[in-house]
């Protein structure tokens, strides 16, 4: 018996009409919300303005996602451009 394991869900995509909801995307969103909430709470406890963390997150989260994607494409460019350069 493995003591520290979380089983994978039997289904990774739920369809709400034409909109597919993926489990990993929902967990990423939940993680972002918890991080902003917790960061805001801790910042206010240390004397900061309540909306500062949220204001920063509005810019940091999209730039982080786009930057992470750019980094992935740059470091694994053979997956996207192939051995010849620009072929898919």
Image: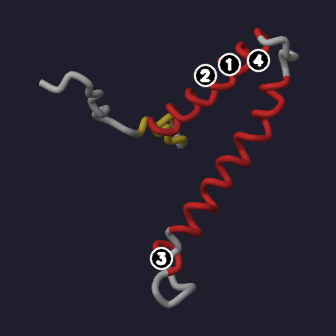
Discs 2, 4 touching: Cβ within 8 Å: no
Give the x, y percent position of residue 82. 47, 82
Q: In the image shown, does 32 or 1 lie closer to the viewer?
A: 1
Badge 3 crowding class, 10 Å Cα cut-off, few under 14, some 14 to 19, many 20 or more, is: some
Q: Distance between the residues labelled 2 and 4?
A: 14 Å
Q: Distance between the residues labelled 1 and 3?
A: 38 Å
Q: Can you name the residue that lies furthest to the top here?
A: 45
Relative to 63, say whether 32 is above or below. Answer: above
Q: Which colour scheme is used?
A: secondary structure
Percent x, y for residue 31? Answer: 56, 29
- Of marks 2 and 4, which one's residue comes earlier in the chain? 2
Task: Check residue 34 in the rendering and tell me which mark sits there, or answer none.
Answer: 2
Tell me the CA gap for discs 3 and 4.
42 Å
Which residue reaches farthest left? 1
Extreme residue toward the right, this view: 49
Q: Which residue is drawn at 76% across and 17% down?
A: 43
Query: Observer-nearest residue: 14 or 28?
Result: 28
Q: Mark 4 points at which residue?
A: 43
Q: Which of marks 1 and 3 is nearer the N terminus?
A: 1
Of the numbered discs 3 and 2, the one sitting upstream in the chain is: 2
- Number of other residues with Cα within 10 Å of mark 1, as a class: few under 14, some 14 to 19, many 20 or more: some
Q: Earlier in the sequence, mark 3 or mark 4?
A: 4
Q: Where is residue 68 in the image (x, y as percent from the top left)?
A: 61, 53
List the single residue furthest toward the front: 46
Query: Residue under circle 3?
Result: 78
Q: Nearer the viewer, mark 1 or mark 4?
A: 4
CB of mark 1 within 8 Å of CB of mark 3? no
Question: What residue did someone put label 1 on?
Answer: 37
């Amino acid at each position: 018996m493995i003591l520290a394991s979380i089983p994978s869900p039997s289904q990774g995509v739920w369809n709400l009409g034409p909109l597919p909801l993926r489990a990993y995307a929902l967990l990423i969103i939940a993680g972002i919300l918890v991080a902003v909430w917790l960061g805001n709470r801790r910042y206010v406890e240390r004397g900061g303005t309540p909306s500062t963390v949220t204001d920063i997150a509005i810019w940091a989260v999209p730039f982080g996602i786009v930057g992470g994607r750019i980094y992935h494409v740059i470091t694994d460019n053979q997956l996207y451009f192939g051995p010849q350069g620009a072929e898919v």
